[in-house]
Image (cartoon, grey):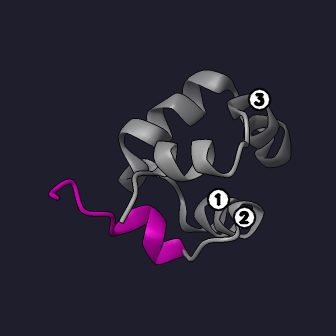
Amino acid sequence: MKTLRQVRESKGVTKAAICRHLGISKPTYDDYEQHPERMRIETAKRLAAFLGISVSDIFFYSKCN
């Protein structure tokens, strides 16, 4: 599985586009990329729909290869 950053980049989506869509600041989104577990579930649902992924992809990515 990919990290949130890898998913965003693979889809060609900018941080600015996500921030606008979610109505959050860039520092807040930066924190979510580093620590997705800090994201509220409603925000995760909106982000997942925007990126075309499942919520579990946000919270349950593997850091191991």
> Is 64 situated above or below 24?
below
Q: Amino acid at mark 1?
A: Thr
Residue 52 shown in magenta = no
What number of labels is visible?
Answer: 3
| Amino acid bearing label 3 | Ala
Q: Which residue is mark 2?
A: 46
From the viewer's side, name the closer residue of 9 and 61: 9
In magenta, the rendered stretch is: 55-65
Q: 10 above or below 56?
A: above
Which residue sits at x=72%, y=64%? 46
Q: Residues within 10 Å of mark 3 (few under 14, many from 20)?
A: few
Residue 56: % across, % down:
44, 76
The residue indicated by pointer 1 is: 43
Which amino acid type corresponds to the residue marked 2 in the rendered image? Arg
Image depth: mark 3 or mark 2 in front: 3
Dot 2: few (<14), some (14–19), or many (≥20) neighbours within 10 Å? some
- Residue 34 locus on image (x, y percent): 38, 37
Estimate the spatial distance between the alpha carbons at disc 3 and disc 2, rounded to whole Å: 15 Å
Dots 1 and 2: beta carbons under 8 Å? Answer: yes
In percent of width and height, residue 50 lies at: 76, 61
Image quadrant holding the C terminus, namely bottom left
Q: Secondary structure at mark 3?
A: helix
Q: On the image, numbered disc 3 is attached to which residue?
A: 16
* Residue 59 is inside the magenta segment: yes
Secondary structure category for the residue under label 1: helix
